[in-house]
Image (cartoon, rainbow, N blue to C red):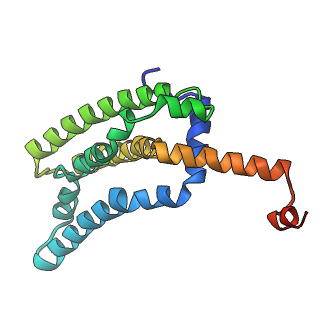
Amino acid sequence: MFGIISEDDKNLLKRVKEANIDEVRLWRIPNIVIPSFIIVFTILIYIFLRPSWTLRGCLNFLVNGSIPLIAVNQIASIGIYIFKFNKAKESELGIETTRRIRTVLFYQVLGLLFSCILLYAYQTINHPFGSICEIIVVALVSGLLVWFSSSVAHKIFILQDDFIKLAYDKDIRDNVQKVTPQSWDDYESD
């Protein structure tokens, strides 16, 4: 239970994601694209403003604490959706409950926040790093945290009440269309 999402929960997330695909795609822009652009842009400014730039100097921008903060920001910006849900509305829609998946995601968030705090502290205390190998290892760990944070934050984002309701409303419409294949025009002419 402490961090493992069940198959039923994965199916629920998939169902809600497919019904809200446009909103889910937009989530990536402020949470991944813009922060990554800022880091790359900063490295480019460093290269153009420093006539004697070094690879180590460029790589040190990746391990100055900014990447763990991206992971924290992803979680912090949508964390309210872990706790905000309407159990009665979920029962109306025929959903057992999302409490289990929200609890699992909560434990993942706590683990992520603790890991990000430790990595951020390590990076800011030891910056600038002298060894390229150390920079690469720390950058890879930072990237892994951002990947995991994106995965968890994405799941939490999908669990919004409005997204769940839309997914189940779409299922109801699809089922009605399967049962009554007539078009509305045929119905009105009867």
Give the residue furthest to the right: 190
> On the picture, is 85 further left or further right than 58?
right
Query: Could you tell me if residue 51 is visible in this image?
Result: no
Please say if 24 is above or below 51: above
Quadrant (top left, top right, bottom left, bottom right) of the C terminus: bottom right
> On the picture, is 178 further left or further right than 34?
right
Front-lying residue, 24 or 65: 24
Residue 184 spot, x, y in % from top left: 80, 63
Looking at the rendering, which quadrant does residue 57 occupy? bottom left
> On the picture, is 3 further left or further right than 179?
left
Q: Residue at x 62, y 37 (%)?
A: 11
Q: Residue at x 29, y 46 (%)?
A: 71
Q: Residue at x 18, y 49 (%)?
A: 65
> On the picture, is 33 further left or further right than 41?
right
Front-lying residue, 116 or 56: 116
Front-lying residue, 52 or 153: 153
Looking at the rendering, which quadrant does residue 58 occupy? bottom left
Residue 33 spot, x, y in % from top left: 36, 63
Query: Could you tell me if residue 31 is visible in this image?
Result: yes
Q: Residue at x 52, y 34 (%)?
A: 89
Residue 103 spot, x, y in % from top left: 42, 26
Q: How many marks?
A: 0
Residue 107 spot, x, y in % from top left: 36, 27
